[in-house]
Amino acid sequence: MCGIFGYVGERDVVEVLVAGLKRLQYRGYDSCGIAVLDGNELAIVKEAGRIERLEQVLSRYTFQAKVGIAHTRWATHGKPTPTNAHPHIDCHGTVSIVHNGVIDNFLNLRESLLNRGHILRSETDTEVIAHLIEEELSKISHEGEKAFVFLKAVMKAVSQLKGSYAIACLWEGAPGVIVSARQGSPLLIGVGNNEACIGSDLNAVLPITKQVILLNDGELALVTQTKVWVFDIEGKEKKVAVQRIEWEVTEEDRAGFPTFMLKEIYEQPERIRKIIALRCQGANPPIFEELDMPPSQLIGFRRIIVQAAGTSWHSGLYGKYLFERYLRIPTDAEIASEFRYREPVLEQDTLVIAISQSGETADTLAGIRQARSRFVPVLSLCNVPGSTMTRESDAVIYLHAGPEIGVASTKAYTAQLAHLFLLTLHLARLKWLLSQDNINQLLDQFNQLPEKMEKILDEQESIVRECAKTFLDSRYFLYLARGINYPTALEGALKLKEVSYIHASGYPAGEFKHGPIALVDKDTPVVCIAPVDSVYEKTLANIEEVKARGGRLIVVTTEGNRDFDEMAEFIFTIPQIHEDLTPLLTVIPLQLLAHHVAAMKGLDVDKPRNLAKSVTVE
Ligand code: M6R
């Protein structure tokens, strides 16, 4: 989705803005632009397409600027053209604005602005904000410090907006000032030494400074090189809370890998090692230092609802299997966008668990707000510190996957599974449902994950590559599994769809004969996830049914299992591990398969069409 960055300080502003944009590009975008105040004059450069193109155009100019704003746009209102790209300006070109979010009442606002003689140039909802600020500036007194005049005009303009926004604006009348506002879309401010920046995302801000102010909904900020003020929408000044955020900023380079997605797939063993070091010291039950919910409360829940979107929902489904098996707590895994509008039954003894890589997904956030408004506590499993979900939940567990740049989630998924497994052990221990011996045995298995992940990456990659080459031109894939690997089937299918644009569906293997089996013909690749586990015999029978109908079998199974030697065209093996940990291994060849098919098709694996890394609109 769209990204915002802004800077005021002594550095080369254009260079800093472009670097900021590059750190935001992983979110997905189709056009980009910057506005700088060159002395007292606004200069705007924007382009459709990639940042490199914007950079080329910018190389023709020399600006003497100390302040600027920048934007990567993911089109919602109007096509990705240079005119629709941000920044947008008012009639006279003295106010400039970048915006993330959606203004719900923009059509009404636009019509009244047109009736009042404004000339609007783009099809976007954003442009109306620049014109509203212009009108407010013309109505209010310009006595006193211009920065505060500007702030007041922005405050009055945003009070007319309905919908979601994070904005940053410049005005020729107040050089050296950025005014920002937040309602429903993330925005943070970096407070450096004689410099400041604003951004929609930590990745953009942290290379400048780790001292950060996290704006809340309904707040505005006046940002200058030396000082930041925060106000509520009524203009009341608020205490500024600067906090230090420790979060590794991703290197822009791909460490020798052709794509971020592949780099992140290969990072998984290391990430799990980190999680082990952090959570499983010695043979104790897992440690969740940040989990701010008393044990007495944690053991009292009689129902769990996990709500999340996309890949995070798949890990939620994995959580359901674990919570029911080990904790005997009835658990639902809900798609967040359905959960929020379904009028769910929410009772006081229910725990809602939200899972999210970004911590900004609008649907999941709405589910959190819905639960909390009904006094149901929310525990979030989230990767990004300081994100909105971490601030709006009753308790948080951080995923420690590190920044994930590829739009297709890989290492965040396995970090989610790992944390759900460890959380289950933690709760089982608190509830005295597992003995210390049982916990130790399970942790011993968990500790073997990194090595086993590495083995898969070392030994299976070439077979997966061969398989990708064979099925490159297939029109659709089917993914089947039973039990705790059913979420793996969904995740494998989603990965393939996202990056290769080949249709794929995941099904519980036992459900397949109730309809989808009609899809199978002699050309259909069917990926069967069949580790030797408690449901293996049943899965095997379902696979036989597929084979009997001519499907082309690709099987993921346990090392040493020879059942598929005659049956399958490709076999990817995983080392032996406890059944409930197999999803952390079986998904790896499927991530590689999706990646390789997309790469062989020459597609942009890290930025698949139409997708965004952080989905901040409904
Ligand atoms: O940041 P979140 O985990 O809340 O994001 C949820 C989904 O948008 C996300 O998992 C999406 O499905 C990914 N592109 C999957 O690869």
Image: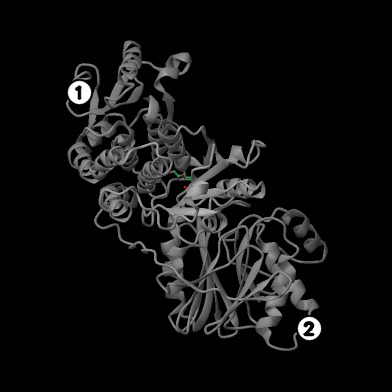
Whether residue 401 is situated above or below residue 115 in the rendered picture: above
Where in the figure is residue 333, as x and y percent of width and height? 51, 35
Q: Position of residue 377 (x, y in %)?
A: 58, 48
- Tally of marks: 2
In the displayed structure, 344 sits above or below 110; it is: above
Task: Name above or below for residue 479 compared with residue 100.
Answer: above
Q: Position of residue 96 (x, y in %)?
A: 62, 71
Tell whether 131 sits left or right of 502.
right
Q: Based on the displayed image, in which of its 4 quarters is residue 417 positioned?
A: top left
Upstream in sequence: badge 1 or badge 2? 2
Q: Which residue is mark 2?
A: 141
Disc 1 and disc 2: Cα gap in Å?
80 Å
Q: How is the image coloured?
A: one colour
Residue 398, percent from left and from top: 42, 54
> Which element carries disc 1, helix, strand or loop?
loop
Q: Is mark 2 within 8 Å of ligand 1?
A: no
Residue behind mark 1: 561
Q: Residue at x 45, y 54 (%)?
A: 291
In the picture, measured across the screen, residue 160 lies left or right of residue 248, that is right
Between marks 1 and 2 in the image, the one whose residue lies nearer the viewer:
1
Q: Is residue 85 above or below residue 6?
A: above
* Badge 2 amino acid: Ser
Q: Which mark is residue 103?
A: none
Q: Which residue is at 40% across, 71% downward?
A: 207
